[in-house]
């Protein structure tokens, strides 16, 4: 894998986008505002478009969702094997009755067997 070094201008553009990102909320809005500022100063050139696109890609790579890796998941993403109780499962009707009548849970809490968490306790 070849490592490509960014030019000082790309790094500067990426810094400006990051600085504006927290105020504007999106990378695209921050890049658009930075481009408008440069055009206002008369500092926008044909090469700037390519550098801005590279800076946007750099910042997007920094802000993409992170996958939390646990032991044995480094090689590949583990498949989802259990999504919680479902209406058609064998024991759900009995569990539902137990929670409603014996444990006195409220109906809205028990009606939907959708999973509330993504990891086992």
Image: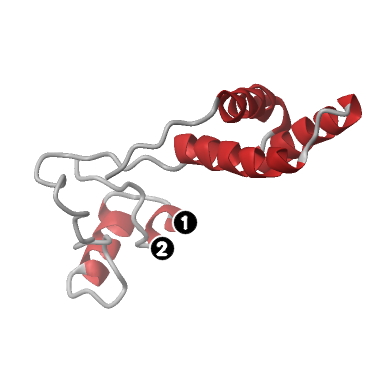
Depth check: give the residue in front, 5 or 19: 5
- Give above or below for 8 relative to 105: above
- Give above or below for 18 relative to 57: above
**Disc 2 on helix, strand or loop?**
helix
Mark pair 1, 2: CA separation:
5 Å
Q: Relative to 53, is 80 on the left or the right? A: left
How many marks overall?
A: 2
Q: Residue furthest left?
A: 72
**Residue at the disc numbered 1:** 108
Q: Label 2 neighbourhood size at 10 Å, few (<14), some (14-19), many (20+)? A: few
- Give above or below for 100 relative to 43: below
x then y, percent, for residue 19: 65, 21
Q: Relative to 99, is 8 on the left or the right? A: right
Q: Which mark is residue 39?
A: none
Seen at 88% across and 24% down, the residue is 41
**Location of the C terminus (image quadrant):** top left
Depth check: give the residue in front, 99 or 64: 64
Q: Are marks 1 and 2 in contact (CB under 8 Å)?
A: yes
Q: Which mark is residue 111?
A: 2
In the rendered image, which quarter is residue 3 located in?
A: top left
x then y, percent, for residue 11: 56, 25
Depth check: give the residue in front, 65 or 97: 65
Q: Label 1 neighbourhood size at 10 Å, few (<14), some (14-19), many (20+)? A: few
């Amino acid at each position: 894998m070849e490592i490509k070094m960014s030019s000082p201008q790309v790094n500067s553009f990426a810094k400006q986008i990051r600085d504006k990102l927290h105020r504007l909320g999106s990378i695209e809005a921050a890049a658009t505002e930075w481009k408008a500022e440069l055009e206002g100063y008369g500092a926008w050139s044909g090469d700037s478009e390519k550098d801005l696109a590279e800076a946007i890609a750099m910042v997007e790579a920094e802000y993409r969702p992170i996958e939390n890796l646990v032991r044995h998941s480094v090689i590949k993403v583990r498949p989802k094997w259990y999504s919680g109780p479902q209406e058609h499962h064998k024991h759900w009707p009995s569990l539902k009755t137990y929670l409603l009548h014996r444990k006195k849970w409220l109906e809205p809490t028990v009606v939907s067997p959708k999973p509330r968490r993504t990891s086992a306790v």
